[in-house]
Image (tube, grey):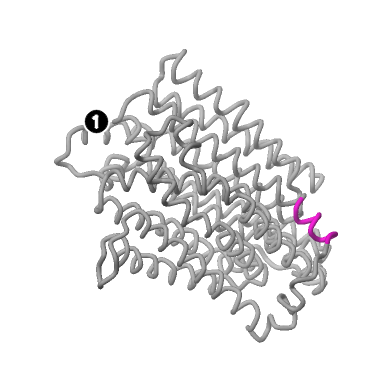
Amino acid sequence: MSAKTPLSYPAHARALLALGVPLIGSHLAQMLLHVTDTVMLGWYGVTALAAVVLGSSAFFIVFILGSGFGIAVLGMVASALGAGDTTQVRRDTRMGLWLSAFYGIAVMPLMWWSGPILQMAGQQPEVAALAQDYLRIAGFGMAPALLIMVLKSYLAAFERTQVVLAITLFSVGLNVAINWALIFGNWGAPELGVQGAAIATLSVQIAGVGLLAIYAGLQPELRQFELFHRFWRPDWQAMRKVFWLGLPIGLTGLAEGGLFQASALMMGWLGVAALAAHGIALELVALTFMVHLGLSNAATVRVGRADGARDARALRDAAATATAMSLAFAAAMVVLFLAVPEWLVALFLDAGKPNTAEIIAFGAKLLAVAALFQMFDAMQVMALGLLRGVQDTRVPMWLASISYWLIGIPASYLLAFPLGLGGVGLWFGLVVGLAAAATLLMARFWHGRLGG
């Protein structure tokens, strides 16, 4: 990525794919962790499943806010590597680990006394109590889960994404094995149900952070960075920098998550079949989103390195290549969603169950709208990745919040209810919010940060 010998666009594409494909795989594997929990608890019992869905959703909301520190480390380390500043690599990563650990400890009271909080949110007492049982164990995994985010970002900035994928896949297998033993009481283990699922989640997070730390600390080419040498020493300057870059990232994630949570709440007002179709369509959209997220992460690294090296040509070319690749994949998904929507929705359903035909028909309509927002969803997450590569997070937080909360959610409500378009109108509101975010964030990068 030298200014003297600029890379061609195909070379940028190859570099982005080498980074991005393992990251896409690790994101999909992370989704598979959730899927295996859902399936295995569904076998165990409906109440247990409802409790863990509720508990894991609460965990995820709290996790998203704290994950900003780990995501910030990705761009910061990439930039420091581009500048050849090995000391800054260590400083930023260490303080990202410190902040993540502090946050994980600070939110434990929320996990421990989650039952009354969930009841105040209108949840049934039995389900809230079981969710609290889950969170009192799984909550101890908040700090390890956030430390994993930091170490993944650290390794991704070094373009060591294959090891991130390998450890995530190992975690999926470990999760299935411990779930099988402790949820159902197999292999001579006690039958713990919801608590067994929580122990599996915690065990996977502890194993994951341990393996990543061992690799980061002992891998020969990374040993020179002495990541854990005198780890106990605080670095207040680096901590402030990571905090003020990471907090807006976490809040941005909350804003986007809030858009989709609000859409689920409003869809529930339209009935069970509508909500089921909404959930299936969102699962399909989430699978495609993982590709865009992986490419966005890879773009953060490539742009961050170019920014650190003060190579404006490489920065622009890497950004343009990543954007074009994400758009090309989005276009392919538009064709798929429009060509076979009924078939895609039917993959999630038992044809013999009541309401299946109704859910398939409604889900197909939602996927037609999802085809519209594929491009916008791709562009908003890519723009965020590019901006994080140049360590611009505060203004994007406000742009995203305005797009999702002041534009997207009101548009969804207005189109769905006062204008009478129902669930399809609600999803058109998502299109409006994502389109606003994509436009504002892309403009921020290409015209605000790069000056055209």
> Residue at image x 29%, y 65%?
190
Q: Where is residue 379 in the image (x, y as percent from the top left)?
A: 59, 44
> Residue at image x 32%, y 64%?
182
Q: In this view, does 363 lie above or below 78?
A: above
Q: Where is residue 184 in the image (x, y as percent from the top left)?
A: 26, 61
Can the viewer see residue 81 in this picture?
Answer: no
Residue found farthest to the left: 352
> Residue at image x 30%, y 43%?
47
Q: Position of residue 234 (x, y in %)?
A: 80, 66
Can the viewer see residue 386 in this picture?
Answer: yes
Q: In this view, does 346 lie above or below 322?
A: above
> Residue at image x 76%, y 69%?
89
Q: Does the magenta stretch include residue 242?
A: yes
What residue span does the magenta drawing correspond to? 236-243
Residue highlighted by disc 1: 358
Q: Position of residue 418 (x, y in %)?
A: 46, 13
On screen, residue 180 versus residue 395, left or right, reads: left
Q: What element carries label 1?
A: helix
User: What amino acid is labelled 1 in the image?
Assistant: Glu
User: Between residues 366 and 450, which one lies in front from this camera angle?
Assistant: 366
For the stretch drawn in magenta, what is the main secondary structure?
A: helix
User: Between residues 428 and 450, which one lies in front from this camera angle?
Assistant: 428
